[in-house]
Image (cartoon, grey):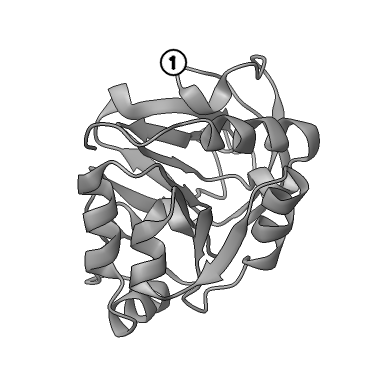
């Protein structure tokens, strides 16, 4: 069973529908006991970094998430769910993230050094490159396209954790992996065939070790 953490931050049903399409039992829940007993856990989300952290704290879920990671349960953060795993975000100055992974979240630049302008948020399909081996991308070719919707992006403090990058107005760390903790800035549940393969790969990970 996969628990999808429901903390009122949106992008819940589409994740559940994708998992059910793959034949996985997927439960939307904010119940710590259900989350802690799950075989896999997903933290989705869209919206504001600060609001999401407040919702997680109000629901007493921050400690639950940290315990999951320390215990080695396969855990996947999606979009805002990726950002919350890190230490801070320019979107919400003074608000601490979960701090499970090292790095910060910054706003996508609207203009490059050469003067080329980009629309922010980035909405649409973009291709991936793989600087390090990542289990999420087994069987997914270099240059595969996935779907993004975001105004802020990850600058990971440990490049060895970055398993996928994409280029928009700047180079974006699009996916990370540490132990049994995975996260992606893009939406696999909206990325059609490639996204389904990424979710299959996550579901194939079994609990082992610690993150």
Q: Residue at the bottom extreme?
A: 58
Percent position (x, y) of residue 66? 23, 57
Query: Quick one: 10 or 25, which is closer to the camera?
Result: 25
- In this view, 21 is above or below 134: below
Percent position (x, y) of residue 60? 27, 78
Query: Quick one: 70 or 38, which is closer to the camera?
Result: 38
Query: Quick one: 82 or 15, which is closer to the camera?
Result: 15
The residue that appears at 44% across and 75% down in the rendered structure is 30
- In this view, 54 is above or below 118: below
> Would you say residue 47 is visible in this rendering?
no
56 sits left or right of 118 in the view = left
Please state, as top left, top right, bottom left or bottom right, where the C terminus lies in the image. top left
> Would you say residue 192 is visible in this rendering?
yes
The residue that appears at 67% across and 50% down in the rendered structure is 19
Instruction: Check disc 1 and report the residue beneath it.
Output: 133
Badge 1: few (under 14), some or many (20 or more) residues near its Cα, within 10 Å? some
Percent position (x, y) of residue 206? 41, 33
Query: Quick one: 134 or 112, which is closer to the camera?
Result: 134
Element class at badge 1:
loop
The residue that appears at 53% across and 35% down in the rendered structure is 202
Percent position (x, y) of residue 12? 62, 66
């Amino acid at each position: 069973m996969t628990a999808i953490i429901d903390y009122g931050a949106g992008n819940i049903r589409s994740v559940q529908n994708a998992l059910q399409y793959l034949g996985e039992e997927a439960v939307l829940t904010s119940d710590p006991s259900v989350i802690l007993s799950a075989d896999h856990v997903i933290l989705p989300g869209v919206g504001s970094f600060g609001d999401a952290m407040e919702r997680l704290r109000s629901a007493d879920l921050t400690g639950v998430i940290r315990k999951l990671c320390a215990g080695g349960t396969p855990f996947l953060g999606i979009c805002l769910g990726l950002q919350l795993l890190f230490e801070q975000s320019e979107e919400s100055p003074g608000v601490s993230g979960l701090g499970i992974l090292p790095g910060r979240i910054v706003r996508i630049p609207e203009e490059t050094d050469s003067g080329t302008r980009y629309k922010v948020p980035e909405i649409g399909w973009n291709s991936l490159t793989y600087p390090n081996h990542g289990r999420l991308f087994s069987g997914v070719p270099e240059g595969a396209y996935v779907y993004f919707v975001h105004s802020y992006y990850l600058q990971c403090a440990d490049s060895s954790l970055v398993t996928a990058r994409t280029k928009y107005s700047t180079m974006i760390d699009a996916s990370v992996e540490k132990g049994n903790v995975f996260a992606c800035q893009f939406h696999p549940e909206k990325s059609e065939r490639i996204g389904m393969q990424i979710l299959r790969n996550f579901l194939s990970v079994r609990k082992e070790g610690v993150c």
